[in-house]
Amino acid sequence: VEELRSDKRFGWAIAALLTYGCRISEVWSLFPEEGGIAECVTINKSKKASEIRSTIALPPQNVEKFDLYNIERNYEYKTPEQYGGERAKAEGYAMAKWLRDYFADKEEKFQLYDLRHYWGIKSTKSDLSTANAAESMGHSVKIHQDTYLSTFALKDAREVAAKKL
C-alpha cells in the first residue's frame, strides 16, 4: 500500500480503504479528522436511507503514515444528498482496473474489497468492541461476528491475551 499511495488519483483511496475499512463507494465521502476517526456517508444496499457515520482508523498511525489529511480528490461528496451512485461506481471500477493493471506482472495481488476485509479481521485483534467495529464498518454486529470473528483463531487469542497481561 505504501508504494500504491504515491499514485495521485487512487493512492489516497487505497490507503483510506485499508485504514478505515469503509466500502469502496464510500471512500469518496471519507474525510479524516484528528484523533484517528473519519466521517463518511454510509451507502446501504437495503432500503435504509444513507446517513453519515463515523469510522475508526486501524491503526491510527496510518493516517499520518499515508498522509491522509492531504488528499487530492477528483471526486467527492459530503452528504447523502450529494451522493452520485453512477459516478461513485465509475470511480470504483476505474480504481479496480488501475489496481489490476498495477498487479498484472506481480506475484502478489489483492482486490479492493480485500482492504475492507483486512480492516474487519484486524478489528478482531484490536481493543475495539465488536459493536464499535461493526458500527465503524456500517453493518450489524451479527454480520461482523459471522464474517470476521470466524477468522479469529487460537493463535489470535494468544496474541490478544498476551497484550492484556
Image (cartoon, rainbow, N blue to C red):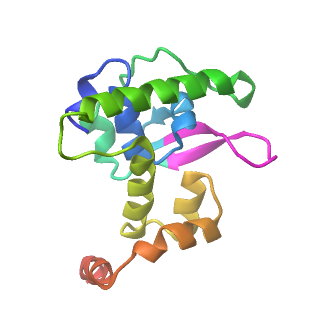
Q: Picture coordinates of residue 98 (x, y %)? A: 36, 26
Indicate left or right for 83 with 154 as reference: right
Residue 18 picture location, percent across and down:
37, 45
Asked if one can make out residue 68 in the rendered structure from this viewpoint, the answer is no
- Residue sitting nearer the eye, 100 or 124: 100
Q: Report the quarter where the C terminus lies.
A: bottom left
Question: Image point 55% across, 53% down: which residue?
Answer: 136
Vertical comparison of 99 with 130: above or below: above
Q: Residue at x 50, y 69 (%)?
A: 129
What's the residue at 42%, 32% (across, down)?
96
Image: magenta residue range:
38-55
Query: From the viewer's perspective, is 153 left or right of 6?
Result: right
Residue 141 among those drawn in magenta: no
Residue found 61% across the figure and 21% down from its top? 87
> Which of the 4 image quadrants contains residue 78?
top right
Tell me where residue 54 sits by quadrant: top right
Specify whether residue 40 is painted magenta: yes
| 94 displayed left or right of 108 | right
